[in-house]
Amino acid sequence: MGYINELRARGYGDHSHDIGSAWLTANATVGGTTTSVQYGNLLNERQREMYFECTRRTDLIRFGLFTTGSYLWVEKGGTPTGVGVDDHYNLYPIPTTDLSVNGSLEQNPGY
């Protein structure tokens, strides 16, 4: 909690946006698992702090939220309200240029 408050103080210029212990101790469900720490809050805080480092996709895969229907965003799965998608999207396809020059490579499943 202290680290998050330090980040917020640096970002906002004061301590007006500090979080309290209730932010961390309430139960939350992330990726189908109920936990005593609100990983959803930590995940969203990390998104704000690491925006330009492009870690969001990796974080969502790590927490099991990237392809599931339990965590949706606009246009996920190509629909306006968002839908869960197949798990093969957790991996990128191997480019055909790489496949054509290295016969030992096999395309990731689903591509």
Image (cartoon, grey):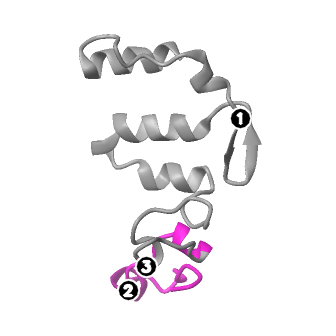
Left or right: 86 as drawn, with respect to 94: right
Residue at 61 percent across and 50 percent down: it is 63
User: What's drawn in magenta, residue-wise?
Assistant: 87-111
Magenta stretch mostly in which secondary structure? loop
Vertical comparison of 32 with 2: above or below? below
Asked whether 104 falls inside the magenta stretch, the response is yes
Label 2, label 1: how far apart the Cα atoms are: 45 Å
**First reached walking from the N terminus: tag 2 or tag 1:** 1
Looking at the rendered structure, the secondary structure element under dot 2 is: helix
Residue 94 in the image, given as x and y percentages of width and height: 44, 77
| Res 100 quadrant in image | bottom left
The dot on residue 96 is 2
Mark 1: amino acid:
Asn
Left or right: 60 as drawn, with respect to 28: left
Vertical comparison of 73 with 8: above or below? below
Residue 52 in the image, given as x and y percentages of width and height: 27, 44
**First reached walking from the N terminus: tag 1 or tag 3:** 1
Asked whether 110 falls inside the magenta stretch, the response is yes
